[in-house]
Image (cartoon, rainbow, N blue to C red):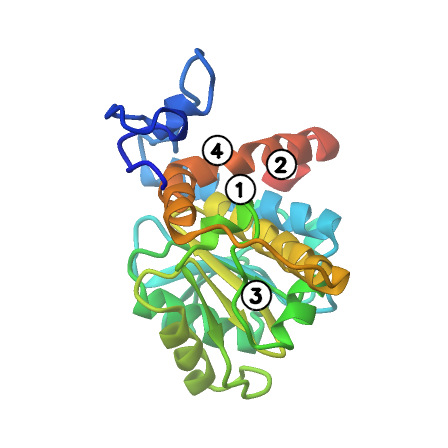
Amino acid sequence: MAPSATEPAASIGVVKAVDPMAAMAHRGKALPSIPTFASLVLKRQWQLEHMAAAFRIFAREGYAEGISGHISVRDPEFEDRFWINPLGVHFGLMKASDMICANLDGDTVGGNVDGSINAAGFQIHSAVHKARRDVHAICHTHSVHGRAWSAFGKPLEMINQDVCYFYKAHSVYDDYGGIANEASEGERIARSLGDGGKAVILKNHGLLTVGQTVDEAAFLFCLMERSCKVQLLADAAGHEKHIVNDAEAEYNFRTASRPETLYIEFMPHYQHEEYLSNGAFKL
């Protein structure tokens, strides 16, 4: 049986408080958590830079598909506004200054006012931002393995440690209604995500993940895409699968699938992109 949230996996029966951030580094210093800022202006710029970096990482992962796909981040000052990518700019070219700020009514209120927003993207992201005040970032693309797995209209199985990050925190939207140009489609997707969900598999469409930071949402998207690939490979092998039991899956989820730890999980990807692009996405 899995240990409780207050005890490490290796010491079942010994009650000991565990700081998940400190636990990542064996006998080392705890990794830095989500930063705080002296002003909302600084926080906004930080969000936009991490948003642009996430797009470039998505490009390197092969998630770009024409003009499909979007990431949005709620504005740190105005709760009824969010930043989203411009229509027709490749993920791999995205910069912080490219992003468009829109309110929940669809009006452009800041940022790249000369850009256009994907209509379907606005309907999906605005609906989720309206429904989930705790969600600050949303990622959705038409990634290859996400699309393949979405054809089954089934949730992922807990067949390895990593997919347990989605244990009882992802759902399937099985009422595909075509390209989401209507507000009702976005609202149905938001309802399918649920009150505390981290991700939803959109049948015949793709994947959508959310988070308290764009880093969390982006890492979860990359992880869910890879989890779909692993599920497809495991199923194709045709052998008996061993499913992680509920107690262990729930322990893994509560230990690792936290906003702080998921932010840290994304940092190596961010740092690598910063190195490869010489920080060009920050412009």
| Precedes in sequence: disc 4 or disc 3 | 3
* C-alpha gap between disc 4 and disc 3: 22 Å
| Secondary element type, mark 3 | strand
The residue under label 3 is 207
| Precedes in sequence: disc 2 or disc 4 | 4
| Secondary element type, mark 4 | helix
* C-alpha gap between disc 4 and disc 1: 13 Å
- The nearer-to-camera label among 3 and 1 is 3
Say what amino acid the circle numbered 3 marks. Leu
Question: Residue sitting at 69 percent across and 28 percent down?
Answer: 275
| Precedes in sequence: disc 1 or disc 2 | 1
| Precedes in sequence: disc 4 or disc 1 | 1
| Snapshot quadrant of residue 81 | bottom left
Residue 73 in view here = no
Q: Quadrant of the C terminus?
A: top right
Say what amino acid the circle numbered 1 marks. His
Circle on res. 264 = 4
| Secondary element type, mark 1 | helix
Question: Residue sitting at 39 percent across and 31 percent down?
Answer: 9
Say what amino acid the circle numbered 2 marks. His
Residue 185 in view here = yes
| Precedes in sequence: disc 3 or disc 1 | 1
Pick whichever, 109 or 19, lies toward us.
19
